[in-house]
């Protein structure tokens, strides 16, 4: 009974969480002697022993050394097989190395990888972007961060305004001016932000998601160039929009002369054309990053006819010279080859139907386990993207999402799932269903989750 008297996270005592964490960490180590030898003490030549610093932030005792990823399965150098529901945190949302993309990359490799000029694939991709996502004018970048930066510059240029607005808890890559939060009712730079000496709140307004009154007040001064938002908050504990929220957002933006930028990098899981097409949103600017080229670094950003007209007028009136928008490797022929294959053969209605069906199966299975063990948790889903949240729900805004996040509990569950053969996203409890995912994989994940939930619930 002593665990009942201890502080709880997500309804689970610290002693139960620690017992699970310690046991599962030891099992993880025992099953990965080769990975431990290679990376547990860091890789030589890299800062902090890893190519990217956040690789140290995975909940596992040390990063998994991957030998091969194919479809929806990862194998590590110790021979462990993992059903992959992380899928590169959407970078491989349609599975690892989809065959059409792999074939297109092999073909293009013999034709040249970059030359700052368009290829025949560029012609086809331009048409496909218009057809699938709806906006008439597009540009290519290499990351969603770059695409968001460029789109925000266009918004500021055509409106003559210098401020933007974001929602608390948002995620738009490494775009500095979006890294603000509401803390104790006040806008502040995001806690933990490294090397930023500016007060970002001087040019960025932040309000809570789903709060149309706060949004209306923030836009009333007519000094905001652009609202940038995901259709669903995803990089925190998932927050779905209230009925009527997006309609109200679109109306308020128009009334105040503010442009609306929809960042679909994570919510492209919703269906063909993303949340924007499935729910008939009407953005002025649109960004899609990681999944658009099947895992090859690429992103796209589009604009409406009206924004394009205003952008051309701005450019004609401006002095000629470097716009500050664009990178040398963006728009390279390898990107176009991979994007064409993805848009034509991978990002299809049939594949989305498969993903939706299995995501519903996953959602229902996780929710049933939560009910069976009487845990104060809930499940959220947007298309093929599913998340369990270790708090009651649904959540309505970023503030609630921050309080719902239980890092120690989530980390222990993550490692326990890995030891049962399932990999989910490392920094939040996100799971993706891909065209390569099978019913058996979903059922194995549900079974593993139920076992862990039962142990935690006692």
Image (cartoon, rainbow, N blue to C red):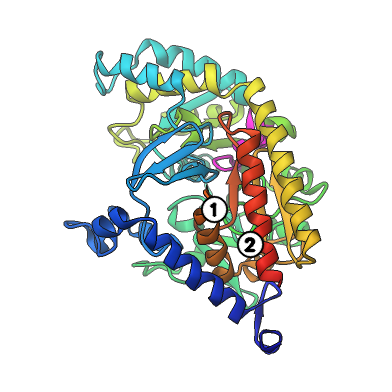
In the drawing, does residue 14 fall left or right of residue 41? right
Query: Which residue is identified by label 2?
Result: 452
* Quarter containing the N terminus: bottom right
As drawn, the label of residue 420 is: 1
Is 243 above or below relative to 356?
A: below
Residue interval drawn in magenta:
261-276
Taking depth in this image into account, of 169 and 371 the one nearest to the observer is 371
| Residue plotted at (53% across, 15% down) | 127
Is 150 above or below relative to 19?
A: above
Q: Residues within 10 Å of mark 2 (few under 14, many from 20)?
A: some
| Residue plotted at (71% across, 67% down) | 391
| Cα–Cα span, label 2 and label 1 | 10 Å
Residue 138: x percent and y percent?
50, 26
Quadrant position of residue 239: bottom right
Label 1 element class: loop
Does the residue at mark 2 contact the one at mark 1 (Cβ under 8 Å)? Answer: yes
């Amino acid at each position: 009974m002593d665990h009942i008297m201890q502080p709880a996270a997500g309804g689970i005592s610290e002693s139960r969480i620690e017992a699970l964490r310690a046991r599962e960490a030891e099992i993880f180590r025992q099953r990965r002697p080769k990975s431990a030898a290679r990376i547990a003490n860091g890789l030589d030549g890299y800062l902090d022993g890893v190519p990217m610093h956040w690789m140290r932030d995975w909940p596992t005792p040390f990063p998994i050394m991957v030998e091969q990823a194919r479809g929806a399965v990862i194998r590590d150098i110790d021979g462990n097989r993992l059903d992959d529901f992380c899928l590169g945190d959407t970078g491989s949302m349609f599975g690892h190395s989809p065959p059409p993309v792999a074939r297109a990359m092999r073909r293009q490799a013999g034709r040249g990888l970059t030359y700052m000029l368009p290829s025949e694939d560029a012609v086809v991709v331009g048409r496909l972007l218009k057809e699938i996502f709806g906006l008439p004018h597009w540009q290519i970048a290499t990351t969603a961060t770059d695409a968001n930066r460029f789109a925000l510059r266009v918004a500021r240029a055509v409106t003559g305004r210098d401020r933007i607005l974001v929602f608390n808890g948002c995620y738009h890559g490494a775009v500095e001016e979006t890294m603000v939060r509401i803390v104790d009712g006040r806008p502040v730079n995001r806690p933990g932000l490294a090397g930023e000496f500016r007060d970002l709140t001087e040019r960025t307004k932040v309000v809570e998601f789903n709060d149309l009154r706060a949004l209306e007040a923030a836009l009333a001064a007519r000094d905001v160039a652009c609202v940038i938002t995901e259709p669903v908050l995803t990089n925190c504990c998932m927050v779905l929009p209230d009925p009527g929220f997006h309609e109200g957002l679109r109306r308020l933006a128009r009334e105040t002369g503010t442009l609306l930028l929809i960042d679909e990098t994570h919510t492209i899981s919703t269906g063909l054309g993303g949340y924007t097409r499935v729910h008939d949103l009407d953005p002025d600017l649109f960004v899609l990053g990681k999944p658009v080229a099947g895992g090859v670094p690429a992103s796209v950003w589009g604009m409406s006819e009206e924004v394009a007209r205003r952008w051309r007028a701005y450019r004609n009136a401006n002095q000629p010279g470097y716009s500050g928008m664009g990178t040398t490797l963006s728009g390279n022929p390898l990107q176009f080859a991979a994007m064409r294959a993805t848009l034509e053969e991978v990002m299809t209605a049939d594949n989305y139907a498969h993903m939706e069906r299995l995501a519903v199966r996953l959602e229902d299975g996780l929710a049933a386990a939560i009910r069976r063990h009487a845990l104060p948790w809930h499940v959220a889903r947007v298309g093929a993207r599913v998340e369990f949240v270790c708090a009651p729900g649904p959540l309505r805004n970023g503030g609630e999402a921050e309080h719902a996040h239980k890092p120690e509990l989530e980390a222990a569950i993550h490692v326990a799932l890995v030891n049962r053969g399932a990999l989910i996203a490392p920094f939040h409890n996100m799971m993706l269903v891909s065209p390569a995912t099978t019913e058996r994989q979903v059922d194995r994940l549900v079974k593993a989750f139920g076992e862990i939930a039962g142990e935690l619930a006692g």
